[in-house]
Each structure stands twice: as structure tokens, then as C-alpha cells.
Amino acid sequence: MAYVIAEPCVDVMDKACVEECPVDCIYEGGRTLYVHPDECVDCGACEPVCPTEAIFYEDDLPDSMTRYANENAQFFTNPLPGRDTPIGSPGGAATLGPIPADTPFIAALPRRAS
């Protein structure tokens, strides 16, 4: 199991969770942040600092947001737009920096008014 970043983060990306994560497993996409399910150590440090309450332990995802567990995983296992290969497990978000792409599901969501 791992923590999952869900819909409330889309088009917000506060990044307080990134600063709090001791293992650097939260990656920045184009419109949202993603937790790498294989790199997350389930410490929970990210969850209480999220101002939009977008982070959930996978087993605690509300029914309306269960799809986001799959989206977090697909960000790393499927090629993203503009990339020929999946991101995989680079061993930390800092090694890659922001990735200007999202899963097709996230990319298709209506944009949040700013």
C-alpha cells in the first residue's frame, strides 16, 4: 500500500507534501503531484501538511476517488505524452524535476478556475 494524491490537488499543487516527504517519492506532473507507490514508505508525513486534503492512505480513499490510486501508479508505469518510455523508479523526484505531463485521465479533467 501507499499514499495517493487525489483530485483536490489537480491545478493546485501546493507542494507542502514534497517538502515533508523524507524519501522524495512525490513527483510533480503538469497539473498534479503523484506519489510513487513503490518508493513510498507509508510514513504518512505528507498527509497532514496537505492544505487541500488531497492525500489519502490507499485503503482510505473515498469511493469517488479510488481511480486516483491507479492514476498515481500509471504515471510511473505507462509512457506519458512526450515520452517514449515510462518514468519507472528513478529513486527520487529530485533526480527528474518537474515532468510537464500527466496521465490521460488527469490531462482530460476540466481546468480549475484560478
Image: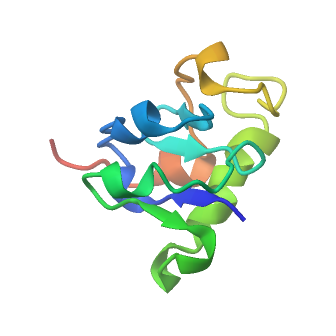
**Residue 96 in view in this figure:** no
**Residue 106 in view in this figure:** yes
**For residue 18, above or below residue 112:** above
**For residue 91, above or below residue 11:** above
Depth check: give the residue in front, 20 or 111. Answer: 20
Give the x, y percent position of residue 49.
32, 49
Give the x, y percent position of residue 84.
82, 23
Give the x, y percent position of residue 24.
59, 31
Locate the C terminus by quadrant. Answer: top left
Quadrant for residue 81, please give it. Answer: top right
Depth check: give the residue in front, 38 or 66. Answer: 38
Give the x, y percent position of residue 46.
45, 49
Locate the N terminus by quadrant. Answer: bottom right
Would residue 72 be found to the left or right of residue 54 on screen?
Answer: right
Quadrant for residue 34, please give it. Answer: top right
**For residue 18, above or below residue 12:** above
Depth check: give the residue in front, 55 or 113. Answer: 55
**Numbered disc total:** 0
Would residue 68 be found to the left or right of residue 108 on screen?
Answer: right
Residue at 34 percent across and 38 percent down: it is 16
**For residue 34, above or below residue 52:** above
Residue at 68 percent across and 22 percent down: it is 82
